[in-house]
Amino acid sequence: MEETVYTLKDYGKVNVNLKHIIDKKGISRSKLSKMVAMNYDLVNRYYNNKVTRVDLDVIARFCYVLKCDVNDILKYSE
């Protein structure tokens, strides 16, 4: 039988690494929420890696404001 993601028990996870980036740059979540014109609660969910669906527009805003790449924010681990 051919393996698919439905037959695998653990296919890994994509983690949001925003906390590490903004802590390193010394930017508060409150300031970041104003810079990206986004609700603080949503920024906080990304900061705490508590999102289940990633909005690509949100990631693009973070990348633009933080001058980083998508792979700096999103990390895949098996």
Image: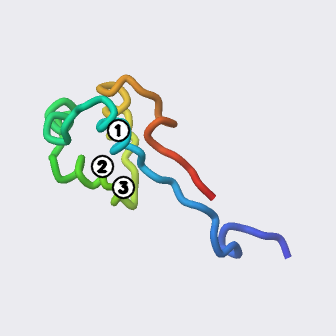
- The quadrant holding residue 4 is bottom right
Q: Which residue is mark 3?
A: 49
Instruction: Report the residue at 14% width, 40% height from top.
Output: 30
Q: Which mark is residue 47?
A: 2
Spot the residue most to the right: 1
Image quarter (top left, top right, bottom left or bottom right) of the N terminus: bottom right
Q: Is residue 46 above or below residue 22?
A: below
Q: Position of residue 27 (x, y in %)?
A: 22, 33
- Looking at the image, do the residues carrying marks 3 and 2 touch, with CB atoms under 8 Å apart? yes
Colour mode? rainbow
Q: Is residue 43 above or below residue 57?
A: below
Instruction: Report the residue at 63% width, 59% height from top.
Output: 78
Question: Considering the numbered disc 1 on the image, is that residue within a helix, a strand or a loop?
Answer: helix
Q: CA distance from mark 3 to mark 1?
A: 17 Å
Residue type at mark 2: give it.
Answer: Tyr
Q: CA distance from mark 1 to mark 2?
A: 16 Å
Whether residue 71 sits left or right of residue 28 in the image: it is right
Question: Considering the numbered disc 3 on the image, is that residue within a helix, a strand or a loop?
Answer: loop
Q: Position of residue 9 (x, y in %)?
A: 65, 75
Q: Which mark is residue 57?
A: 1
Residue type at mark 1: give it.
Answer: Asp
Q: Is residue 14 above or below residue 36?
A: below
Which circle's residue, 1 or 2, is located before the other in the chain?
2
Label 3: few (<14), some (14–19) or many (≥20) C-alpha neighbours in 10 Å: some
Instruction: Report the residue at 37% width, 30% height from top.
Output: 63
Label 2: few (<14), some (14–19) or many (≥20) C-alpha neighbours in 10 Å: some
Q: Position of residue 26 (x, y in %)?
A: 25, 31
